[in-house]
Amino acid sequence: MGIALKHTWLKFGQDDDGASAIEAAICFPIILMMAFGIFQYGIFYNNSTDLNHRFRDASRKVKFMDNPGGALLKSHYQQVLGGYADDVTLEVHKADRYGESFAEVYMTYSYTIDIPLLDKYPLTTKYKNLIMLSSDLPG
């Protein structure tokens, strides 16, 4: 019985039919695409989290400004965005609610995931803030 087990073990170690090479050739591109997708989504998530913190801090500072106008608000937010200015769309609108003037600030961040051997997938995230104003914004 020991000789048969030893013979089977030696035969198992010398099996060179190439099945594992074929499995690796099939699985490698799939694993590579998944790894690139996860990496790219991590970049998007990191950037959107950073932008969320910047947007929140900028909104906090705007609340302490005296009579900010629409142009001043927009330039303040664009200054805070820094290197993200090309990927971010910023809008400032006037809103009258409850007899008071507010500024609605919208920020949209767009990023495209490019996975090798597959299509491109656009991702967007949106942030909104409502800021009470003591002066009116133009239009």
Image (spheres, rainbow, N blue to C red):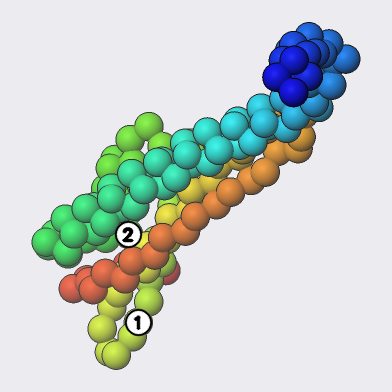
Task: Please indicate whether residue 102 sits to the left or right of residue 109 in the image.
Answer: left
Secondary structure beneath dot 1 equals strand
**CA–CA distance between discs 1 and 2?**
14 Å
Residue type at mark 1: give it.
Asp
Q: Position of residue 129 (x, y in %)?
A: 33, 66
Q: Position of residue 107 (x, y in %)?
A: 43, 55
Residue visible at 29% across and 40% down in the picture: 79
Secondary structure beneath dot 2 equals helix
Q: Is residue 138 visible?
A: no
Q: Residue furthest front?
A: 1
* Quarter of the figure with the N terminus: top right
Q: Earlier in the sequence, mark 1 or mark 2?
A: 2
Residue visible at 13% across and 59% down in the picture: 65
Q: Position of residue 62 (x, y in %)?
A: 19, 58
Res. 70 mark: 2
* Quarter of the figure with the C terminus: bottom left
Residue visible at 70% across and 38% down in the picture: 120
Q: Residues within 10 Å of mark 2 (few under 14, many from 20)?
A: many
Question: Which residue, given by chain and number where applicable, does mark 1 sit on?
Answer: 96
Pick whichever, 23 or 11, lies toward us.
11
Pick whichever, 6 or 26, lies toward us.
6
Residue visible at 44% across and 45% down in the picture: 45
* Above or below: residue 102 compared with residue 126: below
